[in-house]
Image (tube, coloured by chain):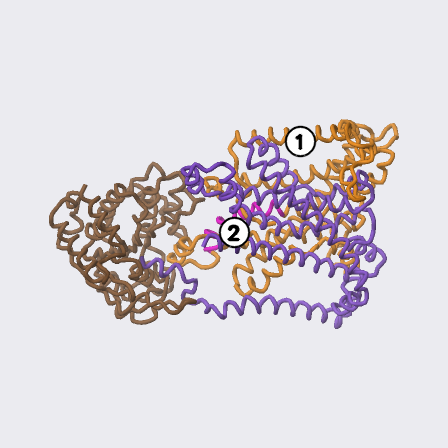
Chain colours: A brown, B purple, C orange
Amino acid sequence: MTTPDTAGSTTPAPEAAAPTAVQATNVEKVFSTSSGQVHALSDVSLTVAPGEFVSLIGPSGCGKSTLMRLIADLEAPTGGQLSVFGKSPDRARRDQDYGIAFQKAGLLPWRTVADNVGLPLQLHKSSTADRKARVAELLEMVGLADFADRHPDQLSGGMQQRVAIARSLAEKPRLLLMDEPFGALDEMTRERMQTELLRICAETSATVVFVTHSIPEAVYLSDRVVVMSPRPGRIAEVIDMKLQSTDERTDELREDTSYFDMITAVRESLHGRSGQGGTQGSGRTSTGHGVENR
Amino acid sequence: MGKQLTDSPVVGPGTLSARRLTTGRVLAPVLVGVLGLLLWQLLVGVFGISSYLLPAPTAIFAEANRAFEHIWSAALITGWNSLAGLVAGTLLGVFFAALAAASKSANAMVNPLVAALAVIPIVALAPILNTMFGSTQFPRQAIAALASFVPVFVSTLRGLRQTNPELRDLMHTYAATPIQIFFTITLPTAVPYVFTGVRLASSLAVISALVAEYFGGPRGGLGGIISTAAASSQYPRAWAYVLASIVLGLMFYLTTLLLEWLANRSRRAAAG
Amino acid sequence: MSAAPTTVKLKDRSGARRAWLGGAAGLLALLVLWEVYKFLGPSDGVMVFDTRILPRTSDLAMPHTWDMVTRMFEGETGAPNADPLWVAVVTAAAFSLGIAAAGWVVGVVVGFGLALIMLRWRLAEWGLLPWIVLSQTVPIIAFAPVVRNWGIQLDPPFFEWRDWMSVALIASWLAFFPIAVGVLKGLQSPETSHTELMRTYAVGWWTMLLRLRLPAAVPFLLAAMRLAAANAVIGAVVAEVSTGLRGGIGRLLIQWAGQASNDPAKAWGPVFGAVALGLVAAGSVALLGLTLRTYRRQEESS
């Protein structure tokens, strides 16, 4: 259907030619603030394969959001190389190779649900008919077809987040960047959204880079979990989720021992290497564990 | 979260360093001001614009310097009217805002009237007030008071309603009396808002006191002299008085800005 | 004079009715206060340190409220075929409203342009904004007597400069400040999450302006436009007085105040006209706001 309008002049690389979705090599990020320099990321190297679901997890200050913002070209790295589908992040952004969803839904309050979902299509000048069809399809996918003409203030937090996810999928991006998209939701809604996200990813076969601070969430969703540690932000360990393929996961997995094993593996990695016995971020994740088991 | 790292510093890629930022913020307006004055002087000097249109800045400064004593006494009259009006308007504004915050029916009565007062040209009352009170300075002070009343009322009422509901609930659990609640929570929250209202009112008070002089009454203030000087084609003189009224307005504004800053600072100190 | 949008809260229908009822009650209270003081107050007013702080109660200083109202329906002059007073007042108010509207339009356009320039170049914001903010403290109306000469002396090439244009120019002087400051604030109001979203869509400055900044600025714009309307009315009335323009409400205020010793109630006619003028100007902007409700959802829900 609608191929994303390439905002730039060069044609996008042939789809199969890019061997990796995201390739980071020795990436550094230093912020200069009034109180001195902050080393947000140090020597980060990571490869994300096409179609893979990778979560970034770690305590406050580990730079997981910063890494995602670098991939999205919302910040520029101060050292190292970063490429998205073999291009610079800037080029990838101009070619609209990725879709993004933030912790805050970030819907424009004056637009209806349908117009919010259609925003990127409208900005990239797709025809009105194409847009209508695609928006209807997306709203169907996130289960909000009946709410197309509502405004964001008439929706619950979970519904708003689903609109934001539909919006991030509007242009069928090959890469989906998600920065704690379910962070503000209650636990029940959150689990339902996670299952829906896996279903949507199976349908679209997109690559996903997912930032979270919930261990069960990372485990449930991912092929691989990247554990990061703070001061300076760096990758502590990359853990393969030895579970069934993400396409086949259902809520039953949440009560499976293999799932608990993986949670334990991530927990130990987080706590073992963050120095202080995991005082930051651990409170949330361990209670998360308890809730997940209900 | 990594978010905290990226959200707190305002300095992202492509932005300037903190020092250059401050320098730019100070230098740019100064530069614009100096350029403006130079351009003005050049226009008058090179293109020979006559003084009824636009006297040269130098001519205005010379006139202001020459007639300094007259200007000073005129500024005292207008300044005093403005000050009296500002103080009276502030007291009335705070009083009625407290009334509106305390009683629903008072709020229902006062609020629409203030909303109307905010959009009507208050100076239009000047001739009427001159008949009611006689030809004195009082009508000007009354006009200045009415003009300052509006922003003080609006801002104070907002401040009085600002109280954090959790704090209010907390006080309730302490079984605090309404008077205790007022002095420990409501008043400290509202005080900075009062001063914000006063700052907004300060320039209105000066403008209104000055303009009220155009509508008759005793001469001698800045507004009266500006209109007589302009009517008798003494343009540099008129502009010198305009300059004085600018300085007067600025003094009121800066003083109230300082007061607002002090009010906020003591609150910050108390909070932190 | 801040242009914060929080002052314009949309009210539901019952809230609006309560406001009208409350306003009427407040007005009635004022009228009663007037008559009671006129009846009980000392005839020479109340003096404190040689300053009369409460007015004289004579019919000359304080006409009865009903006299003010009935006077509106009597002839403007003693002549038998004279129009009723209200006709003259309404005609003059309409004339002033036209001038204020012209000044308002110029002020909105200029203010908007300045806001866009300051949004586009940060150096322009740094250089201009302090002057614009400080100018609010400057009694611009003081320029009124001088401005009239500009039109006469400059003699613009494409049209004939008329006196009402000087008045409109002063009105626009007063109107553009709130617009420039308020619109800039509004255009800068979108949250970082929204501007970053737009950045991920790789859109240009103009698209960001059209799709994000302008819609987000609407509540600020409406508040600023209402302030600008009130300012334009003040500017028009005062400039009419100080430039001596005939035909408007400002002129009537001065002229009929001069006849107050024979006809005290008549002087109140143009005061009512001026009040109506301000209310109509602000009300028109409020009506404009109704057509833009979609863009004010945040205000409504907050």
* Residue C213 among magenta residues: yes
Q: Report crowding for label 2: few under 14, some 14 to 19, many 20 or more residues within 10 A (C-alpha).
A: many
Q: Could you tell me what secondary structure mostly forms the magenta stretch?
A: helix
Closest to the camera, between mark 2 and mark 1, is 1
The residue stretch that appears in magenta? C207-227
Q: Are marks 2 and 1 on the same chain?
A: yes
Seen in the picture, residue A2 relative to B177 is either above or below; the reply is: below
Q: Quadrant of residue B225?
A: bottom right
Would residue B249 appear left or right of C184 to someone viewing this image?
Answer: right
Residues B62 and A103: in front is B62
Would residue A195 appear left or right of B254 to someone viewing this image?
Answer: left
- The chain that hosts pointer 1 is C
Residue B176 at x, y = what percent?
Answer: 46, 38
Residue B19 at x, y = what percent?
Answer: 49, 70
- Disc 2 designates what residue? C186
Residue C22 at x, y = what percent?
Answer: 60, 30
Measure the C-alpha gap from mark 2 to mark 1.
35 Å
User: Across the whole image, how many numbered discs are drawn on residues?
Assistant: 2
Element under disc 2? helix
Which residue is at a point 16% across and 47% down the rendered structure image? A249
> Which amino acid type is shown beneath numbered disc 1?
Leu
Which residue is at a point 69% across and 43% down the rendered structure image? B146
> Which amino acid type is shown beneath numbered disc 2?
Gly
**Quarter of the figure with the C terminus of chain A:** top left
Label whose residue precedes the other's in the sequence (2 or 1): 1
Would residue B100 appear left or right of B134 to someone viewing this image?
Answer: left
Q: Residue C27, labelled with which disc?
A: 1
Seen in the picture, residue C119 relative to C25 is either above or below; the reply is: below
Residue A175 at x, y = what percent?
Answer: 28, 57
Element under disc 1? helix
